[in-house]
Amino acid sequence: MQKEYYKILGLTTSASPEEIKRAYHRLAKLYHPDITGGNSGYAELFKEVNEAYQVLSDRDRKMRYDLGLNNFIIIPKVTFDPYLVAQIDNKEVQLNDEFEITFRYIGEGRVFRKPENRLLVYLSSPVVEHRMIPAGNGEVKETSLTYTVCALDTGRLDIPEATIYINNRQFASAAFTIDVKENACYFKSDQTASVKPYTIHLNKEQEVTTNFRRIFIYRQLVLIPRSAFAYYYHQIGASIKIIFTIVGFLLAVLYNFNWVAGIVIGSFAGGLILHSMYLLTGVKSKFYHALKYKTVVKYLDDNYRPGRDPSYGIFAEKAFYILMQMLR
């Protein structure tokens, strides 16, 4: 049978937290062994007052008690020292190459703020993992957040502290420094990469069935190291393609020709010219070769697809189908 904790403290069920606290202090002083001289009857009353206060002063325990759970058990609170620590998998990295930063904290954290530096890029959302670890007289949940990041420039990269609130107190991780080395340009291997990487977006749609059917969309950013020389010719190549596409469209309209065919022919002619330029300069095409970059291949093998969103691939397929129908 459930004990009558409110009656023990001389309160009603509508008592406020302040009233519960005042009643406890009044009765604890009254029945304290130092006051009663160790009288066994008063010692038992003191024990019941303590037990009632433990339950009614704790929001979760009080809720369970008020719901009338007959199997109510007083579970001792788990005591632990909160912390937030940061760990990096490599303190020497290459420009634009991925590396990981993991932050670990225990308890129920709130308002986590990751380190910010304009030369540090977060490539995806964090991978979140939980585990139970021994703490005090029980176990407490430890959470780890692992971010995939990369550096935008060579030299010393300072990664400032991260912060989080645990039990209404703010904790900070240690700041640390990494050394960013030069990297070879992927699009022209005899050159060194600059601060102008080529950016490619990838996405993955994954269905998880629990009590509810859920679809998660994972987005990944990959930076491909590129020299200033390759960047310059990629910009020229894109301009050539756009100009010839527009010229093809305008000529088709001017001579009353199928404008879609004009766009395709202009784009094809621009493509021939820019690929001839790439061949002469030794620069790889960004559109074709980017998907063969080692990091991109790793994600493609893990069922990622090009584009910011899963609908990207579907849209591209539909657009291609409509275009082929119009050219028939």
Image (cartoon, rainbow, N blue to C red):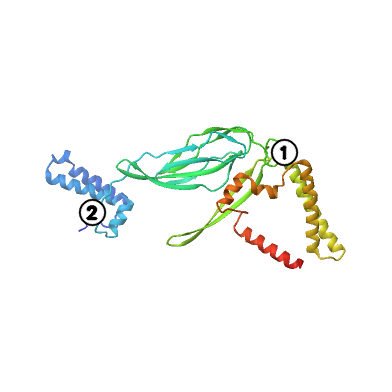
**Is residue 197 among the parts visible in the rendering?**
yes
Query: Which quarter of the rendered picture does the C terminus lie within?
Result: bottom right
**Is residue 172 among the parts visible in the rendering?**
no
Q: Residue furthest right?
A: 255
Where residue 106 sits, quadrant-wise, is top left
Which of the numbered marks, if any, corresponds to residue 228?
Answer: 1
Whole-percent x, y for residue 140 in the image = 36, 45
Which of the numbered marks, if any, corresponds to residue 108?
Answer: none
Q: Between 13 and 166, which is closer to the camera in this rendering?
A: 166
Residue at (19%, 44%) from the top-left corner?
A: 30
Query: Is label 1 in a helix, a strand or a loop?
Result: helix
Relative to 23, residue 310 above or below? below
Residue pointed to by mark 2? 5
Residue type of the residue flagged with mark 2: Tyr
Relative to 108, residue 327 above or below? below
Q: Is residue 175 left or right of residue 8?
A: right
- Circles 1 and 2, Cβ within 8 Å, touching? The answer is no
Q: Between 61 and 141, which is closer to the camera in this rendering?
A: 141
Residue type of the residue flagged with mark 1: Ala
Whole-percent x, y for residue 262 in the image = 81, 61
Say few, some or many: other residues with alpha carbon within 10 Å of mark 2 (under 14 / 14 to 19 / 20 or more).
many
- From the viewer's perspective, is the residue at label 1 or at label 2 nearer? 1
Residue at (77%, 41%) from the top-left corner?
A: 281
The Cα–Cα distance between marks 1 and 2, rounded to whole angstroms, is 75 Å
Q: Is residue 123 left or right of residue 80?
A: right
Say few, some or many: other residues with alpha carbon within 10 Å of mark 1 (under 14 / 14 to 19 / 20 or more).
some
Query: Which quarter of the rendered picture does the N terminus lie within?
Result: bottom left
